[in-house]
Amino acid sequence: MSNVAETSSRTKLYAIIAIVIIVGASAGVAGWWIMTHPPGPPPEQGITLKIITRHDTAIWNIFRDAFLASDLAADTNVTGIDFVSPLAPQWIDVILNPAGMPDVAWGGGPTLFDELIAAGLLSKMNGTYMEDVIDRVPDEIAGAVMKRNDTDGDNLWVAAAISSFGFTVNNETWAAKSLPWPSTWENLTSPEYYHPTATVAMGNAPGTTSNTRIYEIIIQKFGWDLGWDTLTWMAGNARIYGGSVQTQTAVETGEVAVGMTIDFYGYTSMYKYSFCQYVVPQNGSIVNGDPIAIPTTCQHRAAAEAFVDFVLSPEGQSQWLRTTINRMPVLEEAFETTIGETRDDLYNFYNSTIANIGIPFDDDLVLSYEWAFVHYFESVLSSAHTELRSVWGKLINWYLVDPVGRQAQFDTWAAQLAETMTVTDPYTATPEKFDEAYAQSINDLIRADDVFRESIKSLWTTAAIAQYAAVEALIP
């Protein structure tokens, strides 16, 4: 009996030893497998795209909701979008800031995006997928380029929408003030448009890319000298507002009769108010392609490409046609969608827009003086606006006593009032008139050197106030 028990105990012991050996061996194999086959990264949590834009919140909300509901967002694991909307002069700093680093740049006009190209901040949108997406967009519309390529032929930005530029008229205020109908930019400089409470709304150039484009159109239509004359006389009839939204609101509320307008602001005002009317000046506008691009800071390339794909799809393009946006799509197919079929009004505007061949416009020329241009505008027309309005009003009142007999003297003083400033350059100590060549020569300096920019802006404002006072002293 004891032998049987002893045999049983040994059997149990051997079994335990065998189990230990097998478990140990398995653990060793498992350890070897883990070491030689490390696990991949855990599945990425939902991606939040970062988008830098000049578009307003109405556009953010509509495109965010539509894209996040799309298969493109699901396929690239995008679950959120963060928008940031700095002023145009701040874009480069925001893009380069480690806290910024957007995945997509969207909206703000060709000049702003060309500045990003010059700064080396836009990546190539190449490869079969992106090339197929970009091929949906025409190369030109109404004589304006819709794409910008690098020297290798690779795309750097493509238009996502189109725009024209003009003004919105509040017909009730226009009629109440008995103003002549405005069909040209020159009309807005007329003595008949002077009123003690102002009849025109203009946006301060640094604060609005769309109004700045209008001022650049005027400069290229009339030439540098007469262009600045036109802007100065127009400002004499105007109030200057901080941005395009405030400018448009002033028209809608009847605070002024006419306001500088990108087309979709005008269409929205017309949609909301029967007394508003958008006007494209005769022989005085252009068609812009408003870009979308992928910055070099992009952290989620596939997701960014998916967003570009959506924006340039018929469904994405149809979002521009919603009644809270009222923009012109770059693809006509937008009007064949469910939303597009309800917007015959915008389709008529679209057809008239693409049929319009605007004035010759040189984007490269604008880029060469853009920074100097907007800061000079602010210095002499915004910062010295009270003084400008004072002398302009006095000159108009003197002229209207005898318009025929005083026309020649009026023209002389008006030209003297609007002459571009000559100041002593703070770095070279050389007197410099603000002509096109000088604007080009200091453009990069104004962008990069805060001390120079603030110094010369102060000099321009001081000179403008003195010049306006000098003209005012001549008027009997």
Image: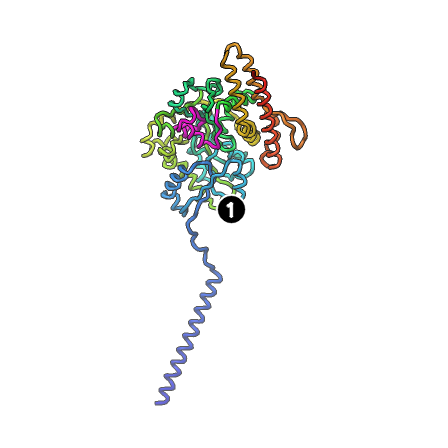
Report which residue position mark 1 lands on.
99
Q: How many marks?
A: 1
Residue at image location 38% in from the left, 80% down from the top: 12
Image coordinates of residue 94 in percent, x first then y, are: 52, 41
| Residue 199: quarter of image | top left
Task: From the viewer's side, name the closer residue of 57 and 39.
Answer: 57
Crowd around label 1: few <14 · some 14–19 · many ≥20 (10 Å):
few
Asked if residue 374 lies in the magenta stretch, the reply is no
Q: Residue furthest top?
A: 405
Can the viewer see residue 367 in this picture? no
Can the viewer see residue 121 in this picture? yes
Q: Residue furthest right?
A: 429
Q: Is residue 227 above or below residue 73?
A: above
Task: From the viewer's side, name the closer residue of 192 and 331.
Answer: 192
Q: Residue furthest front?
A: 476
For badge 1, the amino acid type reads: Ala
Q: Is residue 388 above or below residue 125?
A: above
Image coordinates of residue 328 in percent, x first then y, are: 40, 30
Image coordinates of residue 444 in percent, x first then y, are: 60, 33
Image coordinates of residue 145 in percent, x first then y, are: 48, 29
What's drawn in magenta, residue-wise? 238-267
Quarter of the image with the C terminus is top right
Horizontally, residue 274 falls left or right of residue 447, namely left
Q: Secondary structure at mark 1?
A: loop
